[in-house]
Amino acid sequence: MAKFDLKSLKAEEFINHEEILETLKYAEENKHNVELIDEILEKAKPKKDEAGTHSVGLTHREASVLLACDIPEKNEEMYRLAEQIKKDFYGNRIVMFAPLYLSNYCVNGCTYCPYHYQNKHICRKKLTQEEVEKEVIALQDMGHKRLAIEAGEDPVNNPIEYILECIDTIYKVKHKNGAIRRVNVNIAATTVENYKKLKDAGIGTYILFQETYHKETYEKLHPTGPKHNYAYHTEAMDRAMEGGIDDVGLGVLFGLELYKYEFAGLIMHAEHLEAVHGVGPHTISVPRLKRADDIDPSKFDNGIDDETFKKIIACIRIAVPYTGMIISTRESAKVRGEALRLGISQISGASRTSVGGYAEEERPHDTEQFDVSDERTLDEVVRWLMEMGHIPSFCTACYREGRTGDRFMSLCKTGQIQNCCHPNALMTLSEFLEDYASSETKELGYKMIEGELNNIPKEKVREIAKSNIEAIRNNNKRDFRF
């Protein structure tokens, strides 16, 4: 029997099944223990020590007690705390991005994904470099500056060389005032050597969803293909960090296994990265299983309702306060709006999950990985965010200024990151308003910018930001950053 060890590099030791079962038992026994719940909530409240550093996060056991708690007034306390932590670490900024699907060729047999190799009626497609360029131009014409590239696992059709060539193409495309300033990568687990190549290609965050932390379930859901290897997949983030990628993104596909088990495993994984590398996950994504070609989510009996989903988001925000949290267009506008308050700091906008979908005038469905619930344009999403008091941010400055890994985490945990991020968000929003926004969105946006400039605490930074925004508006200048 594997022993539990957060500092181990073996998957079954840092994501330990027996420890998760004991955690769930402990959480169930203490879900009405008001004294303990109050202690945990007090520990999680943002506060600073003499060095100016926030006290950070909860253990998987503490966080699991909060998730199990079903006392209404305590849950309301959790939601208020999650909202406060989000404001303290990320302010009212919401980072914008879009996924770009390069290829749906895949050799795996994942039972929850329409890309599985046995699906013979899905249209298989792989973008040429010319098609990648067309997709990027279409995304730039919307106003996007940050992409997450996606591809199925297929060593023949989608080798690492193809991914690297696509990244190079994406960075080279300059159209009007458009430019993709950062490419994040969501591809299958690979080798240290290949992670080094991705790092050298200038990627931002390497993202890999665990799908499920339950090993037995994992192996059943991935019956064939290289993804069947639970340990190789689960240990990927350690190899990525060994390869020099210091920003990694975690996530599980909620609905495949019991959510309390997945939650404990996810928090354990974050603890493991902190313990071994001194840097926790840069992002945590919270996708839910959705209908797709050849996939009926009702066949999986672990689906979660909207209220449970919101509780999970709040508890992740409390447990891992420094991480960026991502919600996709899998979710409806209503759910996304409620999730923003509870901890989400990044959202996709105008996403198309089909290969080559952005260059098409009409949204294609024949190569989609999942059904998109929120089909609004980027302009509509940006306006919606501002109407709720959020600043849509197209900023990529931290990646490009070397504020990644432990440097980013240090700034984030002390609250100093907002001295850069707040003005950067306003300047990149101004770029969007000038180049891509409708007149209604533009008017609303500049009203927001005018008010938000007054919230920049340092006078010198405030004056520079004002000057840069004037240059964006009047002199067609772009790409200012702190």
Image: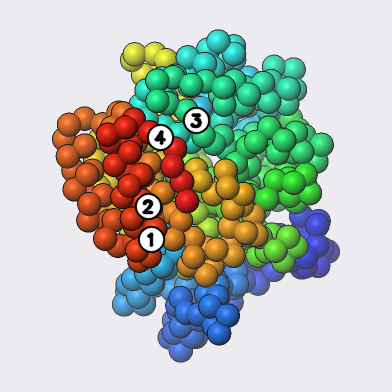
Between disc 3 and disc 1, the foreground one is 1
Q: Which mark is residue 464?
A: 2
Q: Residue at x 75, y 62 (%)?
A: 276
Q: Which mark is residue 180?
A: 3
Q: Which residue is mark 1?
A: 460
> Quick one: label 1 or label 4, which is nearer the N terminus?
1
- Height in image: 2 above or below 32? above
* Residue type, numbered disc 1: Lys
Disc 1 vs disc 2: Cβ atoms closer than 8 Å? Answer: yes
Q: Which residue is mark 4?
A: 478
> Quick one: label 4 or label 3, which is nearer the N terminus?
3
Q: Residues within 10 Å of mark 4 (few under 14, many from 20)?
A: some
Q: Residues within 10 Å of mark 3 (few under 14, many from 20)?
A: many
Where residue 148 sits: x, y (%)?
A: 53, 35
Q: Residue at x 52, y 70 (%)?
A: 414
Between disc 4 and disc 2, the foreground one is 2
User: The residue tagged with tag 1: helix, strand or loop?
Assistant: helix
* Residue type, numbered disc 4: Arg
Q: CA distance from mark 4 to mark 3?
A: 13 Å
* Residue type, numbered disc 3: Ile
Q: Considering depth in this image, is 68 or 127 the residue closer to the camera?
A: 127
